[in-house]
Image (cartoon, helix red, strand yellow):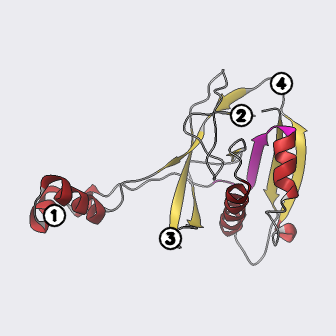
Amino acid sequence: MERYIDIRLLPDPEFPANLLMNALFAKLHRGLVGWGNNRIGVSFPRHDDGIPTLGKCLRLHGDQQDLDNLMARNWFCGMRDNILVVGPETIPTSKVYRCVYRVQAKSSPERLRRRYMQRHHTDAQTARQTIPDSTAEMLTLPYVNIGSQSTGQRFRLFIAHGAIVEKPVEGSFNHYGLSPMATIPWF
């Protein structure tokens, strides 16, 4: 990866930044799905896990040709008044790296019970005693609310920024621009 593009959210009196980020990220996801490329990574340079928020900047990482091809697809149509696109720019030379990846919570005890009943050939009451409601895992990571293209359901896509490392790891990114293995430059 040699280049990046920052897409910064502009202040809007009608919509808070998190709603604009949800819309921007959903459009990016549709753009990446339509393009079918797995060489664009994303990061959120102003994220804050303590609040939690992804901030007001979505950064795209990739090679010049891949970034040009993605931006030519006009995937952010309808958001031009809400964003400022900066770049492509060259990634600074002194860099460190990190993974930006999806984290899925085990938040549905009911789903876990159904799975338990299938695996252990047991009844619902036994499953409920084995897996109480208190087993639901609550994450405190930043997230975007996004709609599934396949099921139509809305869900929270929790995003974690991994530990900073000094060596890059090559790999592919999913249609959200995330990867549990491949790193992006962090600056």
Indicate whether residue 114 is drawn in magenta: no
For the residues labelled 4 and 1, say whether their Cβ atoms are less than 8 Å apart: no
Crowding at dot 4, Cα within 10 Å, few <14 / some 14-19 / many 20+, comes out as few
Label 1, label 2: how many angstroms apart (C-alpha)? 44 Å
* Residue highlighted by disc 3: 151
Quadrant the N terminus occupies: top right
Q: Badge 1, how many Cα within 10 Å: few under 14, some, many 20+? A: some
The residue indicated by pointer 4 is 93
Q: In the rendered view, tell whether residue 109 sits above or below residue 185.
A: below
CA distance separating discs 4 and 2: 11 Å
Of the two numbered discs 1 and 3 on the same chain, state the one appearing first in sequence. Answer: 1
Secondary structure state at the residue bearing disc 2: strand
Residue type, mark 1 in image: Arg
Q: Distance between the residues labelled 3 and 4?
A: 42 Å
How far apart, in angstroms, are the residues tagged by discs 4 and 1? Answer: 55 Å
Disc 4 is placed on an element classified as loop
Residue at 66% x, 21% y is: 166
Q: Name the residue beneath numbered marker 1.
A: 128
Q: Is mark 1 on a helix, strand or loop?
A: helix
